[in-house]
Amino acid sequence: MPELPEMETYRKLLSERIAGRTITGAVVTRDKTINIPPEQFIEAVTGRVVWFVERRGKHLLLHLDDGRRLIIHLMLGGSLYFGDDEDRPDRTVQVELSFGEQKLFGIGLRLGYVHLVTAKEAIERFQELGPEPLDTRLTVEKFKERFKGKRGALKPALVDQHTIAGIGNCYADEICFTASIRPNVRIPAIKQEDWERLFRAMQSVLREATAYGGYMEDPFTREDALTGGYNERCRVYDRGGEPCVQCGTAIVQAEVATKKVFFCPTCQPEA
């Protein structure tokens, strides 16, 4: 599932291509992917100018010139592609937005969606989301406060979008590895110095992953050389049984609260 670095990469690449441009047409092949009848959706977005593209957590928001927003959430298995009909994706496209001859294709959105909402509805939708992990207003103490009262394991809390927005399975494991903390540690057992390491690790991992285009390898455009560059830099995620890049110990794959976790038993000792 795309997480903050992947969605931030989409935001950057998409902004370069559609900000200030007019949506000249739309096609919907799956009614459940949108939140209003297809005919109404197509009529509403056609002719609208995309002022700018914003990201909130794992969502993209296309700000339209009539004040409304297109909210895109890819969920599990979804992706975006920008091109023309010649390099149309082989996968099933649920929604496409045209910008002249170029199109934005929403692919694999069986669980994801593209919703047209008012500015007020957009604000209401995101009220319960936690803060952005790279927001300069988020301090170590405010970060720690987000976990107050939680008694379970660390990873489920890290990927809870009400706690912190934008972190998912991949980066939760990468953050824990960088902080030398096991993802299955119980939150009450985390010491103050651990919180500080965890906070710094969260910032460094997400910044590095964003700089390298995230871990999802499907390109956004034909010439895209950025997307997926972090995949080969993952230290533990999806590397069960492989040697740790720091110490050579085999990476452990386990399960915590129905979620897969990957960690190095040497570099991430038990609390």
Image (tube, grey):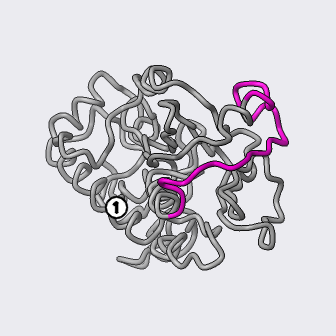
Q: Is residue 70 magenta?
A: no
| SS for callout 1 | helix
Residue 195 picture location, percent across and down: 21, 44
Residue 252 visible in image: no
Instruction: Say which residue label 1 marks.
Output: 205
Is residue 58 positioned above or below 224 on the image?
above
Is residue 151 positioned above or below 185 on the image?
above
At x 65% / y 68%, what residue is drawn?
218
At x 56% / y 26%, what residue is drawn?
117
At x 50% / y 51%, what residue is drawn?
3
- In the rendered structure, which amino acid carries the disc numbered 1? Val
Residue 84 picture location, percent across and down: 73, 67
Q: Is residue 37 magenta?
A: yes
Residue 216 visible in image: yes
Is residue 215 positioned above or below 247 on the image?
above
Is residue 203 positioned above or below 67 on the image?
below
Question: In this rendering, would 209 be left or right of 17?
Answer: left
Residue 102 picture location, percent across and down: 68, 63
Q: Which of 235/19 is in front? A: 19
Range covered by the magenta-colored residues: 17-40
Residue 210 picture location, percent across and down: 40, 63
